[in-house]
Amino acid sequence: MKISSLNANQIESSQSLPARRAVERLLSPFDQFAERSLQFISRSLGQFQSAGRTYGLPRYVYLGPRGGGDVIRIGIFATIHGDEPEGALALTRFVGELEQDPDIAKGYALYFYPVCNPTGFEDNTRHARSGKDLNREFWKESAEPEIRYLESEICLHAFDGIITLHSDDTSDGLYGFVSGSVLTENLLEPALREAGQFLPRNQRKVIDGFAAQGGIITAGYSGVLQSLPGLSRPPFEITFETPQNSSLSRQVEATAAALRTILVEYRYLIAIAQNI
């Protein structure tokens, strides 16, 4: 069944969301997909209390057509900083594309976590309502409920790849962080190239305080969303950053293009490895 994704007017209108924003509004397209699709499933991930209200971490799973080998599990995370909803909006576009062309996800099980910081999104703040920057809390025995739930998911599913979506209001172009598998840079480079159809790449030699080459950073902050440190075979890990002050519709298009490219390239690399 063909299900339309967000149109340009809906995307642009989200730029004027009020300071107190409703998570339900952001998730509405995901829930509509889940109601109509046999491949897209809604599974909420736990609940916690904040300021007398109950919050949950939304989780959706897209099951692509069967491929020729084992199912490839990819976790895609967005809005870990509450004032960066661009990634979640891009995921609505991407899921719409999957519904129209399921072969994009052939051989994959895609786990979507579009709002990892619901209180920060509601308050339009980078941090969670607790005051913590959740993207500095991972694998540090954090007491933050969002972190505990997400760490459990990462361990449970043993993802083959982890993609985190961010938007940076200090950058004038696209860039990304890579870690984990030696194949990671071979995924981010083509992803940035394809996304470059919609937005320029950040070519600075220092980005966000780190040395960069062609928009690719191989260092990173402590405590960011990633797999359990110390794994003998870590997944590929990519943090994809769009320039937040650019057109929102272009950020959405660029991110969707990057996600498509990463899936295509990783499937190709896995096939080559299996034939070696």
Image (cartoon, rainbow, N blue to C red):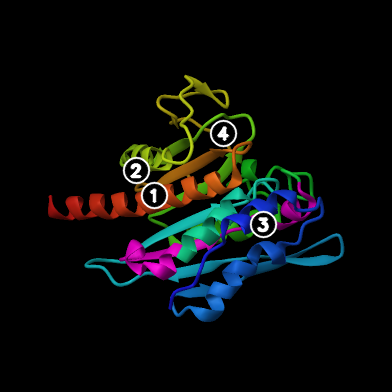
Mark toward the viewer: 2 or 4: 2
The answer for how far apart the CA atoms under marks 3 and 1 are is 21 Å
Residue 261 placed where, x, y %?
Answer: 36, 49
Mark toward the viewer: 3 or 2: 2
Horizontal side of 169 relative to 155 (left or right) equals right
- Residue that numbered label 1 is attached to: 235
Q: Quadrant of residue 54?
A: bottom right
Magenta highlight range: 97-124
Q: How many marks?
A: 4
Disc with the residue nearer the chain's start (2 vs 4) = 2
Q: Is residue 153 magenta?
A: no
Q: Secondary structure at mark 3?
A: helix
Residue 243 placed where, x, y %?
Answer: 57, 36
Q: Amino acid at mark 4?
A: Tyr
Disc with the residue nearer the chain's start (4 vs 1) = 4
Along the line of sight, the residue nearer the viewer: 100 or 260: 100
Residue 161 placed where, x, y %?
Answer: 40, 52
- Residue that numbered label 3 is attached to: 146
The answer for how far apart the CA atoms under marks 2 and 4 are is 21 Å
Q: Quadrant of residue 179?
A: top left
- Residue that numbered label 2 is attached to: 187
Disc with the residue nearer the chain's start (4 vs 3) = 3
- Residue that numbered label 4 is attached to: 221
Q: Amino acid at mark 2?
A: Leu
State the residue at coordinates (64%, 54%). Answer: 147
State the residue at coordinates (38%, 42%). Answer: 194
